[in-house]
Image (spheres, grey):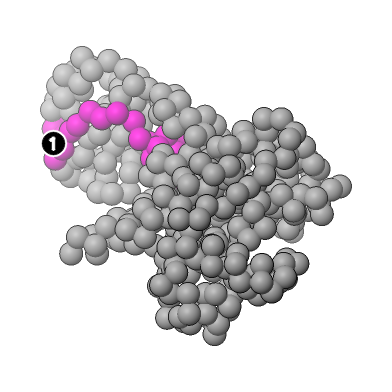
C-alpha cells in the first residue's frame, strides 16, 4: 500500500491554540468563549450533541467563519491575519460528501487535484494513490451515485488529503454510518495520525470519542464544560456509578430524593426507561439505600454498580445526555444484529 507523506510545520508542540472564541448568529450565541489546545500528532475529540457549537468552532478554526471575539492559531499562524497560510496547512471534511455524483471516484479526485494546482499527470497519480490508501481502487471507475454512504465518506476524506495537510478537521465523519463502516473509518483516522497528521474530530458518538481521542473537550451550548483524557473525565465523576431502575415510573421523583439523601450525591435520570444514575464513592452505602427504598415501598427492576462512562460524564456535567446520538447508534446496532 502506498502511504501519504506529510510534512509537519516546525512551530512547536501545538497544532491548534484557540482562546475565548465567540460566534453569534443574530441573538443566538453559538460559541461562547471556547478555548482549545491541540497537541501536534494527536487525535483531539470535540464531543457534544447536535447544536452544541462543534461545527461552528471547526468553521472558525478552518477560516470559514470569522470569530466575533477571541483568537486562534494553527501551527502558530493567526487564522484571521494569516488565513491563506492556514488554508495551506489544513484539510476539512464535513458531515456530508462534497463530491459530484455524476462522476467517478477517479474523476472527482482528479478535478480536486487540478483545482489545487497539480498537473494532469500528477493529478492522476495522486488520485490512484488516495483510492488505494482508502480501499476504493476497485470502485475507481464507478459513478458516485452507486456508492454507499461509507464509500462516499471515505472519498470525501481522501479529497481533503490531496494537498497532504498536517492538520485535518473531521466534522462528524461517521454520522449515519453502520457499525462496520464506522470501524473502517476509525482505522483510517488512526492511520492518518500514524503517518504524521494531527486530527481534530467532532462527534456526537460517545464511543467514538472514547475509542479515538487522546484528549476530549466536552462542549454544550457553545461552552467547553470539561476537558481531559477519557480516563480523566470519567474519574472526575467518581470511581464508580450506581444504576437503579424503578419498577413503577411514578416513584421516580421519590426514588431520586432517597438516592440523593443516602449517597449525598446529585443524581441524573436517563431517558431509557427511567434509570437513575448517581456517583458512588462508598459501595457500603448500597445496603443503606436498599433499606431506605424498601421502607418507602419503592421496588427495583434493576440495580448495578459500574465504572463511569462518557455518557455519565455528560449527564453529570450538563444535566442531560447525548441521547439522540446514542439512540441512533443503538438503532444501527439493532439493525445489524437483526
Residue at 71%, 49% in the rendered image: 89
Q: Is residue 325 left or right of residue 159?
A: left
Q: Is residue 180 left or right of residue 292?
A: right
Q: Position of residue 165 (x, y in %)?
A: 66, 51
Q: Position of residue 270 (x, y in %)?
A: 33, 44
Q: Is residue 44 magenta?
A: no
Q: Which residues are magenta?
A: 296-322
Residue picked out by circle 1: 299
Q: Compared to 2, does 191 lie above or below?
A: above
Front one among 311 and 27: 311
Is residue 321 visible to the viewer in this orientation of the structure?
A: no
Front one among 17 and 287: 17
Q: Residue furthest right?
A: 81
Q: Where, by quadrant of the figure, is residue 284 drawn?
A: top left
Element type at marker 1? loop
Residue at 54%, 44% in the rendered image: 195
Q: Position of residue 129 (x, y in %)?
A: 54, 62
Q: Is residue 147 left or right of residue 106?
A: left
Quarter the C terminus occupies? bottom left
Residue at 78%, 47% in the rendered image: 79
Amino acid at each position: 500500500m502506498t502511504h501519504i507523506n506529510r510534512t509537519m510545520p516546525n512551530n512547536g508542540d501545538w497544532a491548534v491554540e484557540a482562546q475565548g472564541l465567540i460566534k453569534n448568529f443574530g441573538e443566538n450565541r453559538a460559541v461562547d468563549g471556547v478555548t482549545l489546545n491541540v497537541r501536534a500528532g494527536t487525535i483531539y475529540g470535540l464531543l457534544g450533541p447536535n447544536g452544541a457549537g462543534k461545527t461552528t468552532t471547526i468553521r472558525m478554526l478552518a477560516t470559514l467563519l470569522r470569530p466575533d471575539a477571541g483568537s486562534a492559531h494553527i501551527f502558530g499562524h493567526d487564522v484571521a491575519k494569516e488565513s491563506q497560510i492556514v488554508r495551506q496547512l489544513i484539510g476539512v471534511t464535513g458531515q456530508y460528501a462534497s463530491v459530484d455524483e455524476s462522476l467517478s471516484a477517479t474523476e472527482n479526485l482528479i478535478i480536486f487535484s487540478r483545482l489545487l494546482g497539480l498537473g494532469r499527470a500528477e493529478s492522476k497519480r495522486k488520485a490512484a494513490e488516495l483510492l488505494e490508501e482508502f480501499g476504493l481502487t476497485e470502485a475507481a471507475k464507478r459513478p458516485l451515485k452507486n456508492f454507499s454512504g461509507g464509500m462516499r465518506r471515505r472519498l470525501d476524506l481522501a479529497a481533503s488529503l490531496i494537498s497532504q495537510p498536517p492538520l485535518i478537521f473531521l466534522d462528524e465523519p461517521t454520522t449515519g454510518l453502520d457499525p462496520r463502516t464506522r470501524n473502517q473509518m476509525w482505522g483510517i483516522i488512526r492511520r492518518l495520525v500514524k503517518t504524521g497528521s494531527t486530527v481534530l474530530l467532532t462527534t456526537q458518538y460517545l464511543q467514538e470519542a472514547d475509542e479515538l481521542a487522546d484528549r476530549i473537550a466536552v462542549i454544550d451550548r457553545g461552552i467547553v464544560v470539561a476537558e481531559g483524557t477519557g480516563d480523566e473525565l470519567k474519574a472526575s465523576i467518581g470511581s464508580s456509578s450506581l444504576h437503579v431502575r424503578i419498577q413503577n415510573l411514578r416513584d421516580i421523583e421519590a426514588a431520586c430524593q432517597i438516592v440523593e439523601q443516602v449517597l449525598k450525591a446529585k443524581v441524573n435520570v436517563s431517558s431509557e426507561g427511567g434509570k437513575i444514575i448517581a456517583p458512588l464513592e462508598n459501595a457500603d452505602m448500597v445496603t443503606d439505600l436498599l433499606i431506605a427504598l424498601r421502607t418507602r415501598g419503592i421496588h427495583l427492576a434493576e440495580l448495578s454498580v459500574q465504572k463511569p462512562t462518557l455518557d455519565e460524564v455528560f449527564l453529570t456535567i450538563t444535566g442531560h445526555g447525548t441521547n439522540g446520538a446514542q439512540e441512533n447508534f443503538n438503532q444501527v446496532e439493532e439493525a445489524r444484529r437483526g
